[in-house]
Every structure is written in structure tokens, then in C-alpha cells.
Amino acid sequence: MNQINIIGNLTADPQKYATQDGKTIASFTVAVNERRGGKDTATFFRCSAWEKRADPILRYLHKGDKVAVTGPVSLRTYTAKSGENRATLEVAVNDCEFLKTNKGEAYDDDLKHDKSGMTVVSDEDVPF
């Protein structure tokens, strides 16, 4: 089973895209910070949420917000404008939990009842 769980911060506001048949896609990047050998490092994951999962992400999330994302991950390679070959980790979002705003505020309780399938949690709900 290919499944990843990440917690990190959005590097920019989510971008809205649409397929030719009108399906909505929210695309965003999550930076996962960790400390290795006394140094702070970050791993960046590109995330794509489709249709009903995309709507609340586009509506409520902004640069710096903390999220927990779950879904399958894949490696995509591409050639940059400079001609250099690069790779990126991409997550197809199955679940996105809104943890905190970039101002350190927890999301309002009324968001917990959003019918889109997204879950909003506060710090008290996170087990670590």
C-alpha cells in the first residue's frame, strides 16, 4: 500500500486549476521541517486535491498554514527551464486536516462540520 502522512506548512496559497471537463483541482506545496544532525532541513511535497476535497482547501488555506495531509505519494521527474533534470514528490490528497492558521490560531469549530469530507482539528486533538 502506498500511503504517506505528512504534517507541515503551506509554502504559498493553494492554486486553483480545472480539467477540460470542469473538475476542480487545488494544487499546493507542503514543507515538512525536521532537525537532522543539528541542522534544520525541509522536504517539500507537491499536493493535489480534486473536486470536493479541493473546495475547502481553496477557501480556507493560505501560505504558512499548518496541515496534515494523507494520500499516495509518487515521484515525478521533469526538466526545469534551465535545462536541469529535477524530481518532485507528489501526494494525491485523500485527506487534509487543517491544523493552524499562519497566525497560530486554531480553525473555528464551525469548520469541523464542513460537508466536503475535510476534518479540522485543534492542538488538543493532535496526539503529540
Image: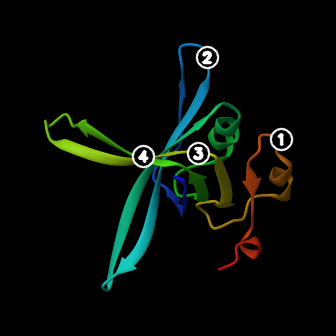
- Residue at image mark 2: 22
Residue 49 against residue 7 in the figure, above or below: above
Is the C-beta separation of discs 2 and 4 under 8 Å? no
| Residue at the image position 28 percent from the left and 46 percent from the top | 87
Is the C-beta separation of discs 4 and 3 under 8 Å? no
Q: Residues within 10 Å of mark 1 (few under 14, many from 20)?
A: few
- Residue at image mark 3: 93
Give the number of the disc on residue 1: none
Q: Distance between the residues labelled 2 and 3?
A: 19 Å
Sequence-earlier tag: 1 or 3:
3
Q: Distance between the residues labelled 2 and 1?
A: 21 Å
**How far across and how far down the image is residue 62, in percent?**
57, 49
Question: The disc labelled 2 sits on which kind of residue?
Answer: Gly
- Residue at image mark 4: 74
Question: The disc labelled 4 sits on which kind of residue?
Answer: Ser
Q: What element carries label 1?
A: loop
Sequence-earlier tag: 2 or 4:
2
| Residue at the image position 68 percent from the left and 35 percent from the top | 55
**How far across and how far down the image is residue 128, in percent?**
65, 80
Q: Distance between the residues labelled 1 and 3?
A: 17 Å
Sequence-earlier tag: 2 or 3:
2
Residue 105 against residue 90 in the figure, above or below: below
Give the label, 2 or 3, closer to the camera: 3
| Residue at the image position 60 percent from the left and 54 percent from the top | 70
